[in-house]
Amino acid sequence: MPRAADVIKFGTFVVTSQVFHLTPLSYALVNLKPLLPGHVLVTPRRIVPRFNDLSAAEVQDLFMTVQRVSRTIERLFEASALNIAIQDGIDAGQSVPHVHAHIIPRKKDDLSNPDAIYAMMEGEDGDLGRQFQERDARAQLNSFEQRGKFPAVDADENRKPRTEEEMMKEADWLAKEMAKDAEKER
Amino acid sequence: MPRAADVIKFGTFVVTSQVFHLTPLSYALVNLKPLLPGHVLVTPRRIVPRFNDLSAAEVQDLFMTVQRVSRTIERLFEASALNIAIQDGIDAGQSVPHVHAHIIPRKKDDLSNPDAIYAMMEGEDGDLGRQFQERDARAQLNSFEQRGKFPAVDADENRKPRTEEEMMKEADWLAKEMAKDAEKER
């Protein structure tokens, strides 16, 4: 979606291939480990930790983007509702110090306990910082491995994040569907 | 805070005395039963259920208001972080069909389990619709009672919502502090 020349960072992590929507001040990205299908993030392009660090223009662009993205996500994932949430600061559960809004599509009885989504956000499965660190560590190990320096690392299927290819495929699909919805609005 | 002539509604509920900040398209109100001290709501003046029902002007005004309110709330309640959350639709836990953003000030170790705030939002203590219904039923009973038609209702101290007076006092305080912060920004 972004031009090949762009490198897009989420905090200190490169997320270029996960980005499916770019605006002048914000972007939207798919998750390494969505808590539910269609769980995506919308974030300002400028890397600042707190919501109150954002300028008026950034706040406006961010939530207009949340609105447009949530419309497409709700349609594609056949959801009837959405959780929209910002963990604004470490003591509110933020794990990557770069403002981001979670958009999580919901449907009736999608979780045996509807509260669970929040515990998931706060728990290990929602720890974005750790997931990105693991991803980067894995990539580094793989590159050592190819040079014959390290043995293969056992992949735990349950904890395995999605591959770059899986995420790029989803990002491409979402980008196309966002364009369709933008066309309809005209 | 609002002029005496204004009647402000949150969904079908009259909340005039709880309102501490009014903008052209949004307002902020204190809670009957805050989940943590300083837990407030910001909502558009127009009563619509879903985030995607809001116009661009409403989205912008709503989140500029969230930003201003959250700054004052974080300062007054000596918080280090905030949860900002919209339960957008019934299947995401929304109990009053009127778009609203929760702002919940957080500090280190404020809850023995940090996840608990979300379970609280989704549980009975976070069921705003029920709380307002109880409040209105209680007011109706009290008015019958004063006419000698009903016996007094036992108040359960644990479940007792704050009184109008308590909420008005907090709303007045927050309105004054919001004005101070607005003054500083000039």
Image (spheres, coloured by chain):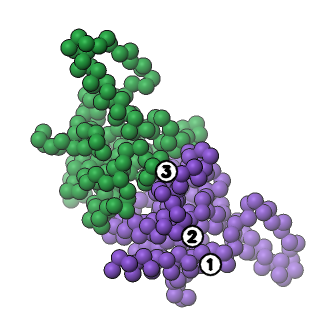
Chain colours: A purple, B green
Quarter of the image that includes the N terminus of chain B = top left
> For the residue carrying disc 3, how many other residues have a C-alpha within 10 Å: few (<14), some (14-19), or many (20+)?
many
Is B119 on the left or on the right of A123, as rendered? Answer: left
Q: Position of residue B26 (x, y in %)?
A: 26, 53
Badge number at residue A169: 1
Instruction: Look at 47% across and 47% down and name the residue there.
Output: B93
Q: Position of residue A71 (x, y in %)?
A: 43, 67
Amino acid bearing label 1: Lys
Is A107 on the left or on the right of A55, as rendered? Answer: right
Q: Is residue A117 above or below residue B116?
A: below
Q: Nearer the viewer, residue A185 or A23?
A: A185
Q: What's the chain of the residue with tag 1? A: A
Q: Position of residue A179 (x, y in %)?
A: 45, 80
Q: What's the chain of the residue with tag 3? A: B
Which of labels 1 and 3 is toward the front? 3
Q: Secondary structure at mark 2?
A: strand
Amino acid bearing label 2: Val
